[in-house]
Amino acid sequence: MIHDLLYIIYYEMRETLDQAFTWLTPLLFFIIVVCLFPLACGPDPVLLTKMAPGIIWVAALLSIIISIGNLFRTDSEEGFLDLILLSHYPLSLLVFCKTISHWLTHCLPLVLISPLLGFLLHLSFQKECALVVTLLLGTPVLSLMGSIGAALTVGIRRHGLLLPILIMPFYIPVLIVGSATILAEAESVSGYYAMMGAFMLLSMAFAPFLTGAALRIGVTQ
Amino acid sequence: MNLHEIINMGGYGIYIWPAYFFTLGVFAVNIGLVVHETRRAKKILSHYFKRHYES
Amino acid sequence: MIFWMSQKFLSPKAFYTTTTHFLPWIITGVVLCLSYGLIAGLFIAPADYQQGDGFRIIYVHVPSAFTAMAIYFVMASSAILVLVWRIKIAAICMSSSAAIGASFTFLALITGSIWGKPMWGTWWVWDARLTSVLILLFLYLGFIALQSVIKETQHKDRAASVIALAGAINLPIIHYSVVWWNTLHQGATISKLDTPSIDPSMLYPLLSMIVGFMLFYLLILLLRMRNQILLREIKTEWVKEVLL
């Protein structure tokens, strides 16, 4: 069974990485949005250092929420969704594998390039390490909660910005704690990391089930 | 208590009365929405029954 | 007891006929509670020692915040009924409550902001309770947006239930935010287990206003549910008889 699930992850990743368009554009969007802020707010290093954690986190959030909408698109267009629902593997497990592959192809590049962007925004080395760790802990939550929204909107044509509007209220706590971790003092920072870890574990435990339920609802129509 | 005292409310009147009028507004909007919905529903239902039972 | 209640309320037709008799009583209750609350709260209750007359905004702020959270609780409970037992009346209740809940959340934010200016010196602060109530407003609006996009009734009900249920986690966060975090917003005035920290002459109008707001919600909910029932059950015989 593990072999099958790993193959699913590998297959999804191959599909995404085949065309540069699918994995490159969210990454470029992330980079461009981060670069917009120094251009808009002025190049003052003091200001940028203070805002950098927030800017990078918000840009990552926007990039992920745009890319997660396509999680089930190819499956629903090519009719694989019914086969997925009929398979003998638990739906939540299959959905979890898809989310893992989404995280590997869309979120991991963001995490890897964030130190460079932190450097552009004059972040200190310590804060850059904190940035990478919080993004590592936080982006799985964003992928998982976004997958719930992707499953809810899977059958709806031309739903526009519905997915971001639905899922943003759930992203807000992660955003608040994630950027607060980077700005936190050394004594209290372990508590913030613990909360980020808690978010990650909770969403890993519950989000696949909700996504599966939402998929079943969306497909039986 | 005379009218001036009531409007002033110990200096806080400028905060209290707008808050209460906002509340009144929200209540009025809710009621208006329901009335509008009821009228619309009655119209839809009367059209439906006219079409299906008199033709 | 449950059997009696399900007889009277579970099927759309039974719900419609049963609630026809309730409406005059609820309207009376709303008028009585709100008039006592307003008159006693605005004119009879003595001015507060610290806040002077400014505390009187409590009589609209606390009821609207309480109602906003209670409505979301009703919506989340109905969502469970829809997802687990596919009860149609619960779906109708859920979709009718959303707009009312959004309006009360908005009112809570506005009255709270107006109260904050003289008390804390600022119209808005990004502390835990205000932020989580703002998130509650976004949850309501997202729910309404999702409902308006899906056309097919059963799909709409079940998809909206998922999102309503997912957002229910916000309710304990709002309620306990003043306990868990050091915030500007004051703590709970009325607690289930303690004697209230507020004088009775100020407390009774407050309770009356809370009950009045909840009865108003009930009134608007029943009226909206009745309209929805008529439209959803348009093809049945009893709807024709009700209208003719």
Image: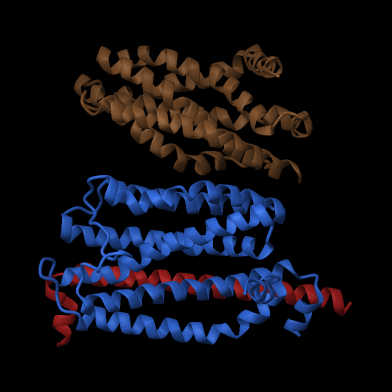
Chain colours: A brown, B red, C blue
**Occupied quadrant, residue C209:** bottom left
Question: In the image, is B40 to the left or to the right of A79?
Answer: left
Q: Is residue A40 visible?
A: no
Q: Nearer the viewer, residue A170 or C102?
A: A170
Q: Nearer the viewer, residue A54 or C136?
A: C136
Question: In the image, is B49 to the left or to the right of A216?
Answer: right
Question: In the image, is C12 to the left or to the right of C127?
Answer: right
Residue C200 in the image: above or below residue A24? below
Q: Nearer the viewer, residue B33 or C36?
A: C36
Question: In the image, is C204 to the left or to the right of B49?
Answer: left
Q: Residue at x 22, y 58 (%)?
A: C116
Residue A8 in the image: x percent, y percent? 68, 19
Residue C103 in the image: x percent, y percent? 44, 62
Q: Nearer the viewer, residue C101 or C73?
A: C73
Q: Residue at x 60, y 51 (%)?
A: C160
Q: Quadrant of the N terminus of chain A?
A: top right
Residue A32 in the image: x percent, y percent? 43, 21
Q: Residue at x 34, y 47 (%)?
A: C131
Q: Is residue A186 visible?
A: yes
Residue C111 in the image: above or below residue A156? below
Q: Residue at x 64, y 81 (%)?
A: C18
Residue C68 in the image: above or below residue C216? above
**Occupied quadrant, residue A160:** top right
Residue C9 in the image: above or below residue A29? below
Residue A47 in the image: x percent, y percent? 22, 25
Number of marks = 0
